[in-house]
Image (cartoon, rainbow, N blue to C red):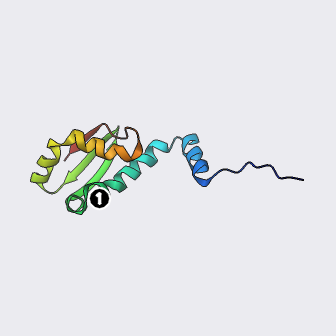
Amino acid sequence: MRRKDNTESLKQVIDRLLNVYQLEDKFTEVALIKSWSDLLGPAIAKRTTRLFIKDRKLFVTLNSAPLKQELSLGKSRLIELLNEPFGRKVIEEIVFL
């Protein structure tokens, strides 16, 4: 007797689970926040004191006024850079505090 092949990869199971429980967006937001230092580098990460996402807005608290000004000038490019690894719009706006 042959066994039915109804196996799924772990990734498929996790993706389905996140989708069923409507956790996919929150999971992606957490992944974006964790990737902040990798995408922007250690110099910016050291000056970042707090990050959180609410209603597709990324709120970033920085302890350097010049850095805040510099990043504000390149907001649109920064949004593209942060969304790129996820292949969709995770955030639509950045607010520097």
Amino acid under disc 1: Ser
**Which residue is the extreme one toward the right?**
1
Look at the picture and state if 64 lies above or below 74: below
Q: Nearer the viewer, residue 61 or 83?
A: 83
Image position, residue 84 (x, y; %): 35, 44
**Which residue is the extreme one toward the front?**
2
Q: Which of 22 and 75 is in front in this view?
A: 75
How many marks do you count on the picture?
Answer: 1
Look at the picture and state if 21 lies above or below 47: above
**Which residue is the extreme one toward the left?**
66
Q: Nearer the viewer, residue 86 or 92?
A: 86
Label 1 Cα crowd, 10 Å radius (few <14 / some 14-19 / many 20+)? some
- Residue identified by numbered label 1: 37
Image position, residue 93 (x, y; %): 27, 38
The answer to whether residue 89 is left or right of residue 45 is right
Image position, residue 7 (x, y; %): 70, 51
The answer to whether residue 21 is left or right of residue 43 is right
User: Is label 1 in a helix, a strand or a loop?
Assistant: helix
- Name the residue: 29% across, 46% down: 81
- Name the residue: 25% across, 55% down: 40
Q: Hey, which quadrant is residue 80 in on the image?
A: top left
Image position, residue 91 (x, y; %): 33, 40
The answer to whether residue 2 is left or right of residue 63 is right
- Name the residue: 23% across, 38% down: 76
- Name the residue: 14% across, 42% down: 73
